[in-house]
């Protein structure tokens, strides 16, 4: 926000009031309040929602007599953007828009800052003409900077030169210590964190090294490096993770933490020998991340109701299942956030601790020191907990302890790796848990997967014949059969405005607009959920050791929506697409 004189501030506020954009009564209330607290008036008006940053920017431009440009939906090409280095643009909140009449046109949040304007002119060697835009608009342009891999290119060149100078038999560690390869690694990590990637894959091929990042659940190739860089890059990662740099025959696992773009990030390293060298997979855990509300994550309707009933009980087990990276831990954190209270003691045992949460006692598993899930759980149960979260049930011993904890009056949260919610029950039986114990301890089981969300820039279209057939086949029985039923069915399923069932398949679907920042028309992810409440009838099936298919059949009769059904409902609601649901949950009926 621009630093304005008192006189300019008054003119801006008067303009907003006279234009009917600000309520004069509310403005006066804030004026009276800041007179006592000495807060900046405009900042106080914005924080209380009386006006917005965009209104302030637009009005300020008018008062100062400078041009205002709305940048929320504008795309700038990379060549133009790079008139100003990304670091400089972020620091000064100024972006290059192009050249006009011999001037470099720069959009700024604070056009009154003459020093910044002069600095940008000196930096670029061009006279600068400043125009004004909102902070939101500037941030939209900042997000369009592509990864600058120039550091990687320099590192490759330097590394190649040094490799030529070294004897073939010389230890790689010497090369690593002396080369700028660490800068290359930092650049790759920065790109991954800014792109919100969950994993980085460094994959050796016969003649090159490929770098891929998993963004929104899908791997994308981001760059290729010469084969000669592989030893230095892999060795650098091994050194940081305290692994053996001279061991190339067996897999190694490690971890380290780094500060990337002012964020503390935990990295989990897995290195394995492959045909053409060593593959490195880096899992990125952003420790500053905040767990979402379960509603924001995509859980709604009947599924949400069953889960909330399960966590409201004083004891029992709440279990989530799904493949690696399906958001199981995030769901558990969101549920714990629902019940967190100073009156109860919540203790967790995790590997790793993915989110830090105030008011929750979190313990990190340390196998090397003898702190496993099983030994840690024994210790936790001596700490007078009301709620226990076990990051993952990996073996029979941990499963037995979790069940015993639930039997002795604790509410237990945990995760397992299974394909569906119903698959949790046979899996625990395989671990040696007695059926009658499961029947008496399980409250709710949750199955989940993640799909990519359609981006904010979207268009609608008529469903194709194939899409319409799939929708009718999967959720035709769930959809309202007349307009009179729409409100009731939509409320029960948790998706407002569902269409009436159409035998001809006349459904309107949504797709995102592909952009630099939204590859494939997707941005972010949402969960697909299926939940089963373990009631008396399900308990009888457990005791009889029924199959997961039998359990799911009864659960569906009681209102359970499968993950694929939930996905198709989300496609009709414009949250995702039919093809995305099929990619993630085509194996589920």
Image: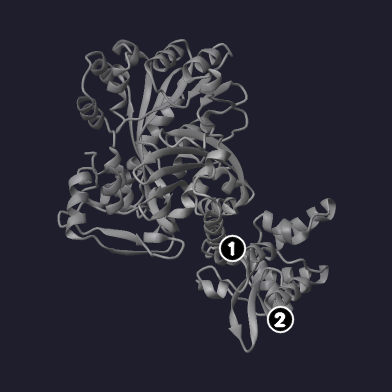
Q: Is residue 76 visible?
A: no
* Residue denoted by label 1: 139
Q: Element under label 1? A: helix
Q: Residue at x 42, y 65 (%)?
A: 515
Percent x, y for residue 297? 44, 43
| Nearer to us in this view, 485 or 187 | 187
Q: Quadrant of the C terminus?
A: top left
Q: Nearer the viewer, mark 1 or mark 2?
A: 1
Percent x, y for residue 126? 68, 81
Is residue 99 positioned above or below 408 on the image? below
| Nearer to us in this view, 20 or 337 | 337
Q: Residue at x 69, y 77 (%)?
A: 62
Is residue 558 positioned above or below 206 on the image? above
* Residue denoted by label 2: 65
Q: Element under label 2? A: loop
Asked whether, in this view, residue 116 is left or right of residue 188, the answer is right
Percent x, y for residue 52? 64, 62
Is residue 459 positioned above or below 475 on the image? below
Q: Badge 1 local density, few (<14 within 10 Å), some, or many (20+)?
A: some
Asked whether, in this view, residue 539 is left or right of residue 19, the answer is left
Report the residue that reaches farthest toward the bottom. 101
| Nearer to us in this view, 446 or 338 | 446
| Nearer to us in this view, 397 or 42 | 397
């Amino acid at each position: 926000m621009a630093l304005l004189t008192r006189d300019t501030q008054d003119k801006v506020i008067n303009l907003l009031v006279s234009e009917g954009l600000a309520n004069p009564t509310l403005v006066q209330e804030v004026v009276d309040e800041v007179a006592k607290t000495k807060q900046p008036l405009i900042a106080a008006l914005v924080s209380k929602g009386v006006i917005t940053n965009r209104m302030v920017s637009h009005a300020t431009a008018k008062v100062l007599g400078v041009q205002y440009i709305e940048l929320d939906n504008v795309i700038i090409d990379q060549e133009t953007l790079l008139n100003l280095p990304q670091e400089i643009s972020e620091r000064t909140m100024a972006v290059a828009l192009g050249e006009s009449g011999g001037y470099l046109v720069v959009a700024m949040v604070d056009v009154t800052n003459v020093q910044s304007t002069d600095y940008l002119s000196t930096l670029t060697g061009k006279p600068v003409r400043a125009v004004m835009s909102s902070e939101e608009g500037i941030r939209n342009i900042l997000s369009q900077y592509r990864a600058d891999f120039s550091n990687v290119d320099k590192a490759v060149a330097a590394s190649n030169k040094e490799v030529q100078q070294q004897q073939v038999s010389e230890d790689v560690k010497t090369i690593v210590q002396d080369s700028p390869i660490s800068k290359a690694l930092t650049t790759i990590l920065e790109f991954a964190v800014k792109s919100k990637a969950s994993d980085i894959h460094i994959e050796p091929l016969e003649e090159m090294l490929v770098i891929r990042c998993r963004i929104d659940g899908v791997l994308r190739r981001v760059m290729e490096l010469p084969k000669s860089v592989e030893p230095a890059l892999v060795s650098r990662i091994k050194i940081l993770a305290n692994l053996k740099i001279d061991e190339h025959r067996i897999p190694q696992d490690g971890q380290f933490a780094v500060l990337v773009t002012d964020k503390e990030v935990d990295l989990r390293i897995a290195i394995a020998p492959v045909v053409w060298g060593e593959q490195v997979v880096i899992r990125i855990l952003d420790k500053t991340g905040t767990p979402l509300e379960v509603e924001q994550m995509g859980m709604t309707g009947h599924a949400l109701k069953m889960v909330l009933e399960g966590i409201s009980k004083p004891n029992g087990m709440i279990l989530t299942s799904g493949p690696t990276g399906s958001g199981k831990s995030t769901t558990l954190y969101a549920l714990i956030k629902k019940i967190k209270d100073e009156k109860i003691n919540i203790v967790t045992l995790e590997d790793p601790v993915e989110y830090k949460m105030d008011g929750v006692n979190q313990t990190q598993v340390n196998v090397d020191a003898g702190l496993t899930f099983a030994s840690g759980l024994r210790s936790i149960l001596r700490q007078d907990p009301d709620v226990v979260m076990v990051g993952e049930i990996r073996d029979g011993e941990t499963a037995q302890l979790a069940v015993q904890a639930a039997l002795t009056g604790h509410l237990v949260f945990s995760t397992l790796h299974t394909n569906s919610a119903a698959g949790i029950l046979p899996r625990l039986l395989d671990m040696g848990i007695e059926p009658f114990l499961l029947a008496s301890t399980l409250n709710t089981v949750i199955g989940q997967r993640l799909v990519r969300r359609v981006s904010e820039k979207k268009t609608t279209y008529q469903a194709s014949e194939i899409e319409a057939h799939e929708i009718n086949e999967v959720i035709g029985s769930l959809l309202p059969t007349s307009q009179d039923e729409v409100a009731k069915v939509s409320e029960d399923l948790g998706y407002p405005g569902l269409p009436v069932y159409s035998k001809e398949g006349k459904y309107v679907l949504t797709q995102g607009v592909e952009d630099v920042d939204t590859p494939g028309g997707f941005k972010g992810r949402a969960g697909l959920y299926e939940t089963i409440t373990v009631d008396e009838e399900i308990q009888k099936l457990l005791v009889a050791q029924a199959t997961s298919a039998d359990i799911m059949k009864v659960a569906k009769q009681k209102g359970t929506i499968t993950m694929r059904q939930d996905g198709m409902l989300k496609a009709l609601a414009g949250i995702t697409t039919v093809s995305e649901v099929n990619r993630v949950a085509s194996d589920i009926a």
